[in-house]
Image (tube, rainbow, N blue to C red):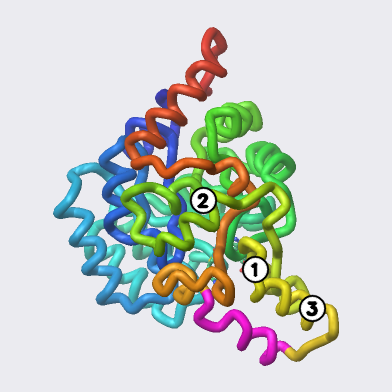
């Protein structure tokens, strides 16, 4: 299953684990990398020291390539960006902004840079400033999202840039991966299915919420505040959307979600917390190890694409 992305990153399979805030720590990232994909540590809003420790822990668990996701809205983004270069991390992905100001430092340190984009315009800008690839992330994804769907965004980004494109949003099985290849993607980034993986340290309640989610259980809060975030529906999303519709202030709305992801991931409060997950949660029905996930995804994709000139 070789593609431009497996060659660029030196990985076995074109399957990347999303750098999810609070979820993507070293146990998960090292397990995905060991299974032949690309594991990613989600730096989110964590301090640089925490990120350095996580990087060192992954290095102690696997020799294989792994990445770090830098969340650009973090108050620690500058320091985390420096740690990534100092630790010579093989790959960095970025989210929630443009990483232009770090590009020179990362390239000089030999880091492959893969910004996550939700529009053609940002994809073009990223190519111009030296990105090695982009992740085109559709609105089906969990967490902070853009407007376009994966089905519409991926082919438009593929046509707009010459660097390889990784599809994200709404993929959790071989059908989704095969579809992403048909749209011109050279790899996929998956989040929701890896949240439920055996090696994922999220609270059991969080895993159960995803495993029992149906197709209609996804909600987006914060459209009115320009910070749309996709989660599973619960008491928090109901209150948020009710108050949002009633014209609540930004401050009041922010208070409803403040610390909500930590509450759900660490404390297991899936009633008041932010249970970030993609729209594909309804398809994720079993808790598998990362190796089992990888074997299943690769087998299904292979079967679907067999006999065709599949991956490029
Ligand atoms: O970043 C994500 N997903 C995330 S970040 C996150 S932490 C967070 N939690 C609560 C509120 C806000 C953040 C949880 N999930 N995905 C990648 C992504 N990036 N999606 C959308 C974007 C994006 C949006 C605007 C990228 C760039 C951008 O504007 C850049 C510019 O300067 O034009």
Badge number at residue 234? 1
Q: Nearer the viewer, mark 3 or mark 2?
A: 3
Name of the residue lying farthest toward the left = 60
Identify which residue is drawn at 17% across, 50% down.
61
Answer with left or right where residue 100 lies relative to residue 24. right
Read off the residue under disc 3.
242
Task: Kindly report the secondary structure that dominates the magenta region of the rendered protein.
Answer: helix
Q: Residue at x 71, y 78 (%)?
A: 240
Disc 1 Cβ-to-ligand 1 distance below 8 Å? no
Residue range in magenta is: 250-260
Can residue 130 be seen here? The reply is no
Query: Which is closer to the viewer, label 3 or label 1?
Result: 1
Out of 84 and 163, give the one closest to the viewer. 84
Horizontal and vertical percent position of residue 213: 61, 52
Judge from the rendering whether residue 96 lies leftward or rightward of residue 87; answer left or right. right
Q: Is residue 33 left or right of residue 92?
A: left
Quarter assignment of residue 202: bottom left
Count residues near mark 2 (Cα–Cα under 10 Å), then give few for <14, some for 14-19, many for 20+: many
Give percent across and percent down for residue 94. 47, 61
How far apart in space, not on screen, are marks 3 and 2 (Cα)? 26 Å
Separation (CA) of disc 3 from disc 1:
12 Å
Quarter of the view holding residue 121 = bottom right
**Where does label 2 land, which residue?**
192
- Residue 49 in the image: above or below residue 232: below
Q: Residue at x 30, y 76 (%)?
A: 48
Task: Examine the structure image and report whether residue 251 is included in the region drawn in magenta.
Answer: yes
Q: If the picture is divided into quarters, which one holds ligand 1?
A: bottom right
Q: Secondary structure at mark 2?
A: helix
In the rendered structure, are the residues bearing label 3 and label 2 in contact, judged by CB atoms less than 8 Å apart?
no
Q: Secondary structure at mark 3?
A: helix
In the image, residue 185 sits, relative to residue 211, either above or below, namely above
């Amino acid at each position: 299953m070789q593609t431009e992305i497996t060659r660029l990153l030196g990985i076995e399979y074109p399957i990347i684990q999303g750098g999810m805030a609070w979820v993507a720590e070293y146990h998960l990232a090292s397990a995905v990398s060991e299974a032949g994909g690309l594991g990613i540590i989600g730096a989110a809003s964590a301090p640089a020291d925490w990120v350095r420790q996580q990087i060192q822990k992954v290095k102690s668990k696997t020799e294989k390539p792994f990445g770090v996701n830098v969340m650009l809205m973090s108050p620690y983004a500058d320091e985390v960006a420096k740690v990534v270069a100092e630790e010579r991390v093989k790959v960095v992905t970025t989210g929630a902004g443009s990483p232009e100001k770090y590009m020179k430092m990362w390239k000089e340190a030999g880091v492959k840079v893969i910004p996550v984009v939700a529009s053609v315009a940002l994809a073009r800008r990223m190519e111009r400033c030296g990105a090695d690839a982009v992740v085109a992330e559709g609105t089906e994804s969990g967490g902070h999202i853009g407007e376009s769907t994966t089905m519409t965004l991926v082919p438009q980004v593929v046509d707009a840039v010459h660097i390889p494109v990784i599809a994200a949003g709404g993929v959790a099985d071989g059908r989704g991966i095969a579809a992403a290849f048909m749209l011109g993607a050279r790899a996929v980034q998956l989040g929701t299915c890896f949240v439920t993986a055996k090696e994922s340290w999220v609270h059991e309640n969080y895993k159960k919420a995803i495993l029992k989610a149906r197709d209609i259980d996804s909600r987006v809060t914060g459209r009115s505040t320009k910070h749309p975030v996709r989660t599973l529906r619960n008491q928090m999303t109901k209150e948020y959307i009710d108050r949002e519709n009633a014209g609540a202030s930004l401050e009041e709305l922010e208070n409803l979600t403040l610390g909500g992801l930590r509450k759900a991931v660490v404390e297991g409060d899936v009633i008041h917390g932010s249970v970030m997950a993609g729209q594909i949660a309804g398809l994720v029905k079993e808790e598998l190890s990362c190796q089992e996930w990888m074997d299943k995804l690769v087998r299904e994709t292979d079967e679907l694409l067999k006999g065709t000139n599949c991956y490029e």
